[in-house]
Amino acid sequence: MEIIQIIQIATAIGLIIVILLQNKGTGLGGAFGGGNNVYLTKRGLEKKLFVATIVLASIFLLVSLAIIIL
């Protein structure tokens, strides 16, 4: 049980770091359609961070469900 909790904490910390690294540099106006930013495909490091976010979030969800079941 302790190992599962350690995995959950490590996953949470990794998820926080990956999310914080995804800085697009847009202000509040970009959230409401301001600016002339055209969405382009993700490439390079941005794509790897995106995939890492999905993987870490999935692992976090599965570990959380495992803790509830156990």
Image (cartoon, rainbow, N blue to C red):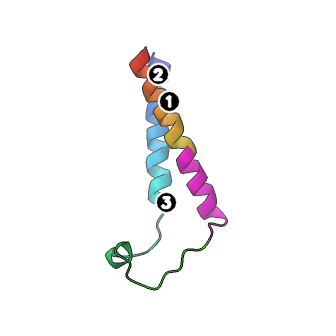
Q: How far across and down, in percent of the image, does residue 70 sit?
A: 43, 14
Q: Which residue is mark 2?
A: 66
- Distance from disc 1 to disc 2, alpha carbons, whole Å, reads 6 Å
Q: What residue did someone put label 1 on?
A: 62
CA–CA distance in space, label 3 to label 1: 23 Å
Cα–Cα span, label 3 and label 2: 28 Å
* Residue 23, above or below 12: below
Give the camera-side residue of 40 and 53. 40
Residue drawn at the location 42% of the way across and 21% of the way down: 67
The earlier-in-sequence mark between 3 and 2 is 3
Tags 1 and 2 in contact by the CB under 8 Å rule? yes
Residue situated in front as seen by the camera: 70 or 40: 40
Question: Which one is in front in this view, the residue at disc 3 or the one at disc 1?
Answer: 1
Mark 2 element type: helix
Specify whether 50 is left or right of 12: right
Percent coordinates x, y for residue 28 in the rendering: 32, 74
- Which portion, as a residue range, is magenta? 41-54
Q: Is residue 6 above or below residue 13?
A: above
- Disc 3, disc 1: CB below 8 Å? no
Q: Which residue is mark 3?
A: 21
Outermost residue, bottom direction? Answer: 36
The residue lying at 50 percent from left, 20 percent from top is 3
Vertical comparison of 48 with 34: above or below = above
Name the one closer to the observer, 45 or 33: 33
Q: Which secondary structure is most common in the magenta stretch?
A: helix
Q: Is residue 43 magenta?
A: yes
The location of residue 43, given as percent across then percent down, is 66, 67
